[in-house]
Amino acid sequence: MANTLIKALESAGHCVKLASEFRSREPLGDPTRQKVLRFEGHKAAEDLINKYALQEHFPDLWFTYHVYYNSFFFFGPLVAKELNIPYVIAEASHAPKRAGGPWNMNHQCVENSIKEADLVVGLNSLDAGCVKPLLHENTKYLQLKPFIDLPSEKLTRKGDKRSTFARDMNLNTDHIWFLTVAMMRKGAKHKSYEMLAKSLHSIKKSGWQLLVAGDGPVRSVVEALFDGLPTTFVGQQDQPTISNLMTISDVFLWPAIEEAYGMAMLEAQGHGLPVIAGNTGGVGDIIRDGVTGTLTKVGDVAAFSNAIRQLMDDPETLAEMSLQAQSTVKQDHSISGAAQQLDTALTGLISG
């Protein structure tokens, strides 16, 4: 999403510079480590301020992507205030339940950062409820639908690519091809893989196969979950290969446990893949239930399995969902539309 935001801004004529590669993620809730990161962050911000002070021109505004409790980025408010430039946040997440807990220091920093913002760009509609109450009366809130950058040419099924891949991987082109693209790490991703495997094990019919693109520290554990199922693991792949996999597949599957909104699911729809997913987080922002895919109760194995069976048994609905998925992404989730809205909001801040 960060890369896509940069592309959107650049396509609107803005010059985007990565200010720092400082990493502030603290996933364990260690207050001592948070203090160290805060000190290092303040020092890095001072260095940036001093660097900009020596330049004839410095930034017109500061743009921060994804402020949240366990990876708070310290620079924005400090640099923006010192340079007297607007401060913008895209995808701010505020979790009141973190107050007083092991991430309390970061939680307070997030609150203060949101209060300092001149513009907040929301990408997950569920974030707005906790973020908007913190905003200053003059702060603007821009709700954007998640967006992606797809090729401008019309995306079509390429039978030759499917045939070639099937021959290389010993797959049946007549079967329905399910696709999953996700990292393999502990926590929510692992839980989603567990549920996906349980759902597929409960489907007592043949004529399908699952392609899985992804890698990570628990890959061997994930692969073991799918023992006995017609599953092909292709590992971590580059973006062109992922796009090819989406082009030759039929349905995208992901239980989406604790998912924010899921860029892979949005990209899959852009390639004409209906998506079956758990209805959690902002997933409903990108999947139109019954139109571009099916949303099920998150964590409900039976409902997820039933949704898979229904699409397998209804090729007409599958084909219609495929068309609707592609047209919906083009209409509502394009990078050009987002770029126009961002440009209007940022230009207004700069000129103001």
Image (tube, rainbow, N blue to C red):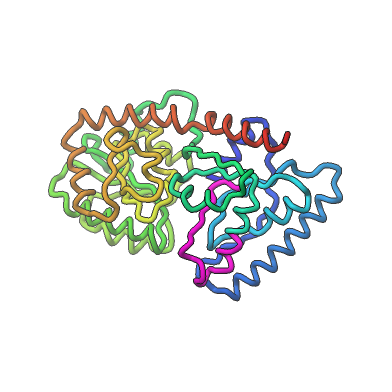
Q: Position of residue 14 (x, y in %)?
A: 68, 34
Q: Residue at x 51, y 71 (%)?
A: 100
Q: Is residue 179 visible?
A: yes
Q: Foreground: 151 or 82? A: 82
Q: Position of residue 145 (x, y in %)?
A: 47, 38
Count of numbered marks: 0
Quarter assignment of residue 249: top left
Q: Is residue 320 above or below residue 187?
A: above
Q: Position of residue 273 (x, y in %)?
A: 33, 35
Residue 221 colored in magenta in the image: no
Q: Position of residue 67 (x, y in %)?
A: 57, 54
Q: Residue at x 20, y 56 (%)?
A: 228
Q: Is residue 245 visible?
A: no
Q: Residue at x 82, y 56 (%)?
A: 50
Q: Foreground: 213 or 256? A: 256
On screen, residue 99 versus residue 156, left or right, reads: right
Outermost residue to the left: 204
On screen, residue 304 versus residue 246, left or right, reads: left
Q: Foreground: 157 or 134? A: 134
Residue 106 colored in magenta in the image: yes
Quarter assignment of residue 321: top left
Outermost residue to the front: 137
Q: Which residues are magenta?
A: 89-110
Outermost residue to the bottom: 32
Query: Which corner quadrant holds the C terminus?
Result: top right
Q: Foreground: 291 or 108? A: 108
On screen, residue 197 versus residue 88, left or right, reads: left
Q: Is residue 80 above or below residue 32?
A: above
Q: Residue at x 56, y 60 (%)?
A: 71
